[in-house]
Image (tube, helix red, strand yellow):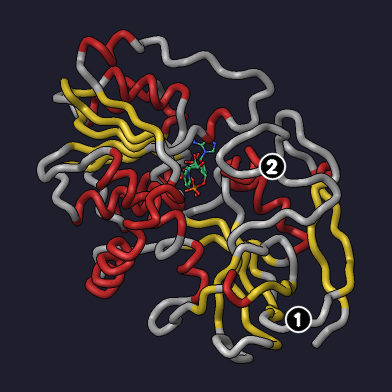
Amino acid sequence: MTSTTREIHLASRPSGWPTHENFRIVETALPKPAPGQVAIRNTVMSVDPYMRGRMNDVKSYSAPFALDAPLDGGVVGEVIESNHESLQVGDTVLHGLGWREHAVLDANKVRKVDTTGVPASAYLSVLGMPGTTAYVGLVRIAELKEGDTVFVSGAAGAVGSVVGQVAKNLGAARVIGSAGSPEKVSYLIDELGFDAAFDYHEGSVSKQLAAHVPDGIDVYFDNVGGDHLEGAISNMRDFGRIALCGAISQYNNEKAAAGPRNMGLIVARRLALRGFIVSDHNDLAKEYLAQAAGWLADGSLKFRETYVDGLDNAVDAFLGLHRGSNLGKMLVRLV
Ligand SMILES: NC(=O)c1ccc[n+]([C@@H]2O[C@H](COP(=O)([O-])OP(=O)(O)OC[C@H]3O[C@@H](n4cnc5c(N)ncnc54)[C@H](OP(=O)(O)O)[C@@H]3O)[C@@H](O)[C@H]2O)c1
């Protein structure tokens, strides 16, 4: 086992868009695992939009990252030393100490994953937190019904791409997605089976959406906020449901953004808007995994992953996520 390893620390808190100066790569000693612990060589780590919020020093559902300490987040890897009977050297595992090349932690904080038929990275994407978020938002928060017309923003990303496909699999009549490039729009229609999609750079969200769904939408799954939320509200049918999952268009704003200008329609159309955090709904994870395994097997759930190589480029991967350089889940390959 190696005696040193590398990790990424938060050097200062970003204001607006993060820069490389906000992060530092640190070489550090790798401790031997104590009784009950394992040592893991991390192979693929996740970068996620919620991590931007944790870089601010504000109280939220997830604690802020500490300064001059390693960041953390979802990661998969291989056990290289084990002091606990539940895990063997060579096991592939999922855990929460990403942003570093190795991790030593208690075995009870590590989950062994089954890599028959799927790469380990799937547990960071379609079979992991983003996939479960899509399912929770559609099924529990938006209460998707057969025959619904569904609009999802950020549709070519990790959560959004699962939302569209799962909505179809659960009986949505029509699924429309928005994304940031013509290539992403083609991917949604040609590969993922969306009924329609548009590039939000090509005109107002509200007008583009209306052109595809003149009769309106029943469900909006919001990954973007801002103009997307406003455009969706304008196109909701009476008694429509909106699952507020995220607002990535606003995460790097220096000042809080103004709300949608058409909030009056929420009353007029008797809409229900509900925010959610996936970790409050862990009881649905098993149900989703069982369904997703079937859909992956029959080809009705497809997924893509975009890779950036090496811990040295992890910050670029994180920034790229906010610029739309990912198709599907953004991941960092560490070995
Ligand atoms: N509530 C929860 O529990 C929960 C859990 C997971 C994720 N989330 C939220 O879900 C959303 C998607 O997360 P993800 O992990 O699946 O990320 P992702 O969609 O894979 O990646 C982020 C995408 O956001 C799009 N984007 C960036 N800036 C934008 C802007 N100004 N306007 C419109 N689109 C923009 C980019 O795609 P384009 O090229 O299309 O612009 C980018 O690829 C985020 O808001 C995240 O915070 C919430």
- For the N terminus, the quadrant is bottom right
Quarter of the rendering containing residue 262: top left
Dot 2 lies on which element? loop
**Left or right: 254 in relation to 180:** right
CA distance separating discs 1 and 2: 27 Å
Q: Mark 1 or 2 closer to N-term?
A: 1
Residue at position x 42%, y 50% in the image: 159
Name the residue nearer the viewer: 125 or 286. 286
Q: CB at mark 2 closer than 8 A to ligand 1?
A: no
Which residue is rendered at x = 35% and y = 12% of the image? 263
Which residue is identified by label 2? 64
- Residue 114: quarter of image: bottom left
Query: Counting other residues with Cα less than 10 Å from the Cα at mark 2, is it few (<14), some (14-19), or many (20 or more)?
Result: some
The answer to whether residue 221 is above or below residue 170 is above
Residue displayed at 39% across by 47% down: 160
Count of labels in the image? 2
Residue 239 placed where, x, y %? 17, 24
User: Of tags 1 and 2, which is closer to the observer?
Assistant: 1
The residue under label 1 is 33
Relative to the observer, which residue lies in front, 28 or 224?
A: 28
> Is residue 255 positioned above or below 42 on the image?
above
Tag 1: amino acid:
Pro
Identify the residue at image location x=64%, y=84%.
79
Q: From this view, report whether residue 204 is shown above or below residue 321.
A: above
Q: Where does the image place residue 119, in percent across and percent down from the top left?
A: 47, 76
**Position of 265 relative to 309 (above/below):** above
Determine contact: label 1, label 2, CB under 8 Å. Answer: no
Secondary structure at badge 1 equals loop
Disc 2 residue type?
Answer: Pro
